[in-house]
Amino acid sequence: MTAGGRPRFDLPEVDAFTRTYWDAAAEGHLLVRRCHAPGCGRAHHYPREFCPHCWSEDVTWERSCGRATLYTWSVVHRNDLPPFDARVPYAAAVVDLAEGPRMMTEVVGCAARDLRVGMALRVAFREAGEGLAVPVFEPGDGGIISHDHHRPRPLATDR
C-alpha cells in the first residue's frame, strides 16, 4: 500500500468481516448494518458484528439508499500524510445517513463556503486503487431527510 514508495494512509485494512462492505463500495453501493433484535431494529455504521445499541449479534448487511444530511465539518488545510497532502484543502465531515447512523466521511464537489448544516448529500465513491473505493458525499437533491423514511431490505448474502 504505497504510492511512489511512500506509504498510503487512506486505504482500509480489509479483513474477512469487512470484505462485503468494501466489495459493495467498489461496485458503488454503501452498506450499513441493521439489528434484527426485538425492540431494536436500528442501523449502525461503522460495520460491527454486533449491535452497538443493544449488543445483539442478530445483525445483517443492508444497502443504504445513499442519502445523508451534513451534521458538521472541518476544512483541513494541512495534512502531511500521503495522499491527503495532495488533497488539501478538503472538508472532513460527519453526516447523518438516511438510515439513522452518523458516518465520518469527506464532502466533495462543493466549495467550503457553500457547506451548511442540514444540507442534503448523496454518496459518491473515490477510487482508492488496489480495487478499493471509499465512500464520500457530494451535494444532493432534496431537503433534510427523515431517518424513518427509507428502510431497505437486508442483502440476500446475510442469511
Image (cartoon, rainbow, N blue to C red):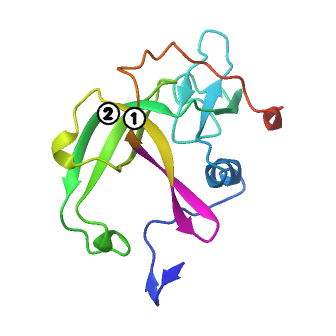
Q: Which mark is residue 27?
A: none
Going from N to C along the chain, the mark reached first, 1 or 2, is 2
Q: Which element type, helix, strand or loop, lies under badge 2?
A: strand
Give coordinates of residue 121: x percent, y percent: 39, 35
Badge 1 density bin: few <14, some 14–19, many ≥20, Cα 10 Å: many
Give coordinates of residue 47: x percent, y percent: 58, 41
Query: From the viewer's perspective, is residue 85 above or below residue 148?
Result: below
Residues rendered magenta in the picture: 126-137
Q: Which residue is mark 1?
A: 121
Give coordinates of residue 25: x percent, y percent: 61, 50
Query: From the viewer's perspective, is residue 79 above or below residue 71?
Result: below
Query: From the viewer's perspective, is residue 69 above or below residue 129?
Result: above
The secondary structure that dominates the magenta segment is strand
- Residue at point 51% right, 13% down? 148
Q: Which residue is mark 2?
A: 70
Query: From the viewer's perspective, is residue 5 above or below residue 147?
Result: below
> Which of these two is toward me, 120 or 39?
120
Asked if the magenta segment contains residue 131, the reply would be yes
Label pair 1/2, CB-CB below 8 angstroms: yes
